[in-house]
Image (spheres, helix red, strand yellow):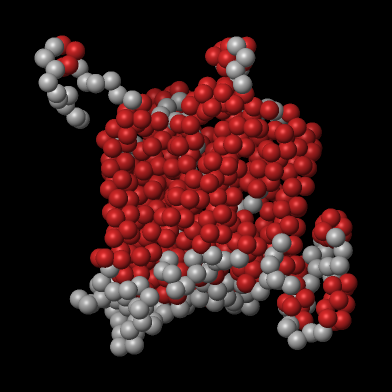
Amino acid sequence: MLSYLGRKLIQMLPVAFFVTVIVFSLTNLLPGDPTVTILGEQATPEQRAAVRVEYGLDQPAPIRYVTWLARVAQGEFGRSLRTREDVGAMLAARIPVTLQLGFLSILIAVTIGVPAGILAARYRGGLIDVAASFVAMSSMAVPYFWMGVLLIMLFSLQLGWLPPSGHVRFFDDPAQNMKLMVMPALTIGTAFAALVMRQTRASMLQVLSMDYVRTARAKGLNEGLVLIRHALRNALIPIITVIGLQVGALLGGAVVTETVFALPGLGRMLVDGIFQRDFPVIQGAILFIVIAVFLVNLLTDMLYRILDPRVET
Amino acid sequence: MVAVTGSMPPSPASEQRAPRSPSAIIMRRILTSWQGQFGVVVLAVVVALGLLAPWIAPYSPTDIDPEAFSMPPSAAHWFGTDEIGRDVLSRVLHGATVSLQVVVFAIGLALVVGSVLGLISGWLGGRWDALIMRVMDAFLAFPLLVLALSIVAVLGPDLMNAMLAIAITKMPGFARLVRAEVLSLREVDYVVAAQAAGASPWRILSRHIWPNVSGNVIVYGSLSASQALITESALSFLGLGVQPPTPSWGYMVATGIQFYQSWWMSFFPGLAIFLTVLALNFLGDAVRDAFDARLGDRND
């Protein structure tokens, strides 16, 4: 397993190199003079020149790339051009919000998707199956931002149960925090539930046709026990894999969802950074997202190998 | 089914259907599945409404009516009016062409560039293959929307750049698909034979390999279309796509959100996105089934 992990990491090195090049070029090709962002329009040429030296902007691009990479490798993402805030500290403040959102979304997706998928597979072609497929197909076609709007219309305007947007830290006021998190989590969670449901249905169908399931039924085991103990346990691996591989899509969804609900998360940080042409912030946010997606994918891959001993390492 | 007509004398041969080209068979399969029918009908309606918008829209999409700010749906304004008195229905109709244009061009560009890169990578192998594929993998390491966002941030927010950004995010998928197919086709007897007969690489790729790859490429393209539309609308929603006053569905939802009480401002453009994405999804599934391709889910 360890040698596999090592090989995998070495394989990833060239890709990682190009990823950092892409992130660096993206932010260095950003139009507009960064000294204007830092100093405003009024600054004198001397002040601009001083800032260029301070930020290393007077160096050629390859040298800036190497210095930037060396700093990032030490966990130093630089400071925001606008607020002078440390990007690392900004990330640390915003990651928990996105993490909570992601965790709740996956929880909702699994709670809805797995039972729906099991039922759809068990009663294949029946009313439940058709209805579940229809709902899944529809919920995958709903853009995140529209889902958010619909939820706000229903829960905030019509029913008046939940505040439409905003954020409170969980440790400051857990009840209010959850109230504010329900709708964002539902927005992403329902879209993910469709995915989880489809995968659950597909892998359950495969497992249910296996001999050992027939044997379990022939023994006279109760159907619920057959479904959960015999079938679901073996169908779980692809379901976990799908969830793991979709973490990237989840973070993409978080960008939009956090904008709709005014959540101060990672996605919102990226969008704000783009609008304010604040390149250290953009670099930090993108880089963190890419690393997170990479690590989760790697973890999923390892988990897959641990859970399924048939897969050679 | 079209009956064979003409002045031919009746003979057993003319009773039989005329031989169909493969593309006709595919078209028939798409149009006989209910997913295909749903997709084609809805898309045809959306395209027709979008193209005819200048004539059928009751108002101009950009005209401001100071007498009718944020009016709920009524006989005069079926979908209501927005915060500065523009007719929402007219704006939704005009928005159709903009969004679909982005989808068609973005997928088209991604298909062409990605396929060419895939052909080069798979055929040449070695260093070129390694270089092209590592760069493609690097692009794939980014979540789709995050990459599209960043590219638009660099290029500046407008329609063309949104298109380009979506094309870049979809390109690696095509490149990988084509490369994998080329790698397996290189060893096939007729390709080896063509090579032995001295055919040029260009001829082999265009005549012997591409026809066998193009089916899957079309399937992948149609499965990607809905994703492209969702990305486009998300970019517009964030204010990084089509720029106002040009109407775009995503941007309309974004402005609508600021006026919660006027639900119609964001509901109808959102509904338009939803229906179009649904139609693209169904059509994509129908195309995949028609080609009998074993490509993965659209959520790659």
Residue A244, above or below A41: above
Q: Is residue A220 left or right of residue A2?
A: left
Measuring from the top left, give residue B21's x and y in whole percent.
33, 25
Measuring from the top left, give residue A197's x and y in whole percent.
44, 46
Measuring from the top left, give residue A199's x and y in whole percent.
47, 41
Residue A24, above or below A176: above
> Which residue shows up at 20% across the image and 30% down it?
B1
Q: Is residue A153 left or right of residue A230?
A: left
> Which residue shows up at 61% across the image and 65% down it?
B156
Measuring from the top left, give residue A3's x and y in whole percent.
79, 33
Q: Give the quarter of the image for residue B136.
A: top right
Q: Is residue A104 visible?
A: no
Q: Is residue A310 left or right of residue A14?
A: left
Residue A168, above or below B177: below
Quick one: which residue is furthest to the front in this view? B7
Q: Is residue B80 visible?
A: yes
> Which residue shows up at 66% across the image and 74% down it?
A276
Query: Which one is nearer the viewer's eye here, B277 or A216?
Result: B277
Q: How many marks?
A: 0
> Which residue shows up at 84% across the image and 72% down it?
A52
Q: Is residue B167 left or right of residue A15?
A: left
Q: Give the quarter of the image for residue A4.
A: top right
